[in-house]
Image (spheres, coloured by chain):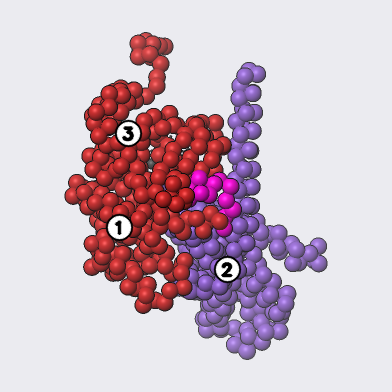
Amino acid sequence: MSASEATPLIDMKNVRFGYGERLIIDGLSLTVRKGEIVALMGGSGSGKTTLLGLLGGRIQPISGEIHVAGQNVPTLARKELYTLRRRIGMLFQFGALFTDLNVFDNVAFPYREQTDLPEPVIRDLVLMKLEAVGLRGAHPLMPSELSGGMARRVALARAVALDPMLMLYDEPFTGLDPISVGIVGRLIKRLNSAMGMTSLIVTHDLTETLRIADRVVMLASGRIHSDLSPEGMHSSTDPFVRQFADGLPDGPVPFHHPARPYAEELFAR
Amino acid sequence: MIGALLNGLTALGSTVTRRLERLGLAARFSLTVIMVLWPALRRTPLVIREVYFSGVRSISIITVSGLFVGMVLAVQGYEVLQRYGSADSLGVIVSLSLVRELGPVVSALLFAGRASSAVTAEIGLMRATEQLDAMDMMAVNPITRVVAPRFLAAIISLPLLSAIFSAAGIFGSYLVGVKLIGIDDGAFWSQMQANVDFRLDILNGLLKSVVFAVAVGLVSVFEGYHAAPTAEGVSSATTRTVVTASLAVLMLDFVLTVLMFRGLM
Ligand SMILES: Nc1ncnc2c1ncn2[C@@H]1O[C@H](COP(=O)(O)OP(=O)(O)O)[C@@H](O)[C@H]1O
Ligand SMILES: [Mg+2]
């Protein structure tokens, strides 16, 4: 094994980030090795999307190091950052397809912007990527004509267009019907192994996550609360993990928004 | 008492700070847009597409408005001029009003309502649906790819639209003044030709509309780019574009007019 394969693809050390006074990420450390599929779980607003933003260099941490493929992202100049981003694919929560372009042109976008390939070659590449997500026949459609699941698959084809080494997924299953969830989950797994990628998936869908992930990382209070294998998730006795895995309404994540005592509020004048 | 005063002061202070912060943001944003104008201009098809949406599709509203404004000017102008027996000068009055003032100003106001609001809504929607973020993550700068072409389109379109407005207006006044009221055809055109100066009137009018285009264009892309990523965010950004751009046009018009005709004062 060469040295580059031994170093992790993602290596975050003691990262802190906040909006205004409020810390969202507070001393978080996380490593992801090459080839892994890591699922990142945590309540809404726990900072999962923020974490992906930090990894992509869209926001700057207050302190800490964020290494992606050996480069410390927060220190990169715009040019170097863009060079790194060409090797990172990101699937946004609702696909973020360009609404003024049809399916074909959406997938062709990265080739046209980043390469000098002639149009016939681009055509073949686009159709290949669309074939991989089962939507070659949908290439003339506009995004508004697609179902949620189809839009997510087109966005996936666009995200992997330039064969990235790292794929970041922001809630790829949210809002999809169970069949589409299965399809997208299998695609993520297949693309990861077939293209030699590494994947970080932010998700709430525990069933699908346990089926495809190598590790499940839970985010709470701005740091990594637990880092378990899918089997470990099933057998864990940690109350926070259990609340998540069993979908309990109350637990370490409280049902009630912080408030002053009920009696006090009711009788207050 | 003192508490209320302090609260009022605090509120005032934070409002002022917020306004100033936004002004600073706008200035910095404008700079980043201007920095990428050249690379954006080299991607001509993108700019042409925006010129089509903002400019070409505004031609009909601009022409019709110009025609009506010209017709009204002819009626009003004739009413005043005939008192002094100088109805023959109608062409001069109308064309000067149009070329110097109404052409650039009314076109810019119409452009703000028709094209710039659409630009704000479009960019704001791209922000709300994470299309701008997706583009940025694909290592494509949204300022170069999305913002700059739309800004350039405003600068290219608006001066041309102003010219169309003025031309339509002059034609409208010709219809009313000559064809309807019966002013002498030759006098109408020859007085206009003799009294409208290319540099003082036409170039200055053109300069005005270029300045208005910069203002209206910047406001529309800034508001869209910085819209809150929600439905209300986009709709209030659109409203702000129309209000801010219209006020900017009227204020700039005053400043420019004073500068251009300062010899009179
Ligand atoms: N641009 C922003 N400005 C201020 N606060 C933000 C912004 N984006 C997100 N937040 C806040 O940061 C927290 C984490 O957000 P996010 O990372 O989107 O959470 P999630 O885990 O649901 O993806 C949330 O409480 C959210 O309200
Ligand atoms: Mg999120």
Residue A218 placement (x, y as % from top left) = 36, 33
* Ligand 1 location (quadrant): top left
Q: Which chain is purple?
A: B
Q: Which residue corresponds to the image point at 62% horizontal and 62% vertical from the top-left?
A: B35
Q: Is residue B201 left or right of residue A231?
A: right
- Residue carrying label 3: A228
Q: The magenta stretch spans which residues?
A: A67-79
What tint does the image give chain A?
red
* Chain letter behind tag 1: A
Q: As displayed, is residue A11 above or below residue A147?
A: above
* Chain letter behind tag 3: A
Residue B32 placement (x, y as % from top left) = 61, 57
Label 1 amino acid?
Ala
Disc 2/disc 1 C-alpha distance (Å): 37 Å
Q: Which SS class for mark 2?
A: helix
Q: Nearer the viewer, residue B123 or B238?
A: B123
Which residue extends farthest front?
Answer: A1
Which residue extends farthest left?
Answer: A179
* Chain letter behind tag 2: B
Judged by depth in the image, the label closer to the viewer, 2 or 3, is 3
Q: As displayed, is residue B54 above or below residue A62?
A: below
Label 2 amino acid?
Pro
- Residue carrying label 1: A194
Q: Nearer the viewer, residue A61 or A145?
A: A61
Residue B39: which numbered mark, if any? Answer: 2
Label 3 amino acid?
Leu
Query: Does the rendering let one see residue B172?
Result: yes
Disc 2/disc 3 C-alpha distance (Å): 48 Å
Count up the numbered dots.
Answer: 3
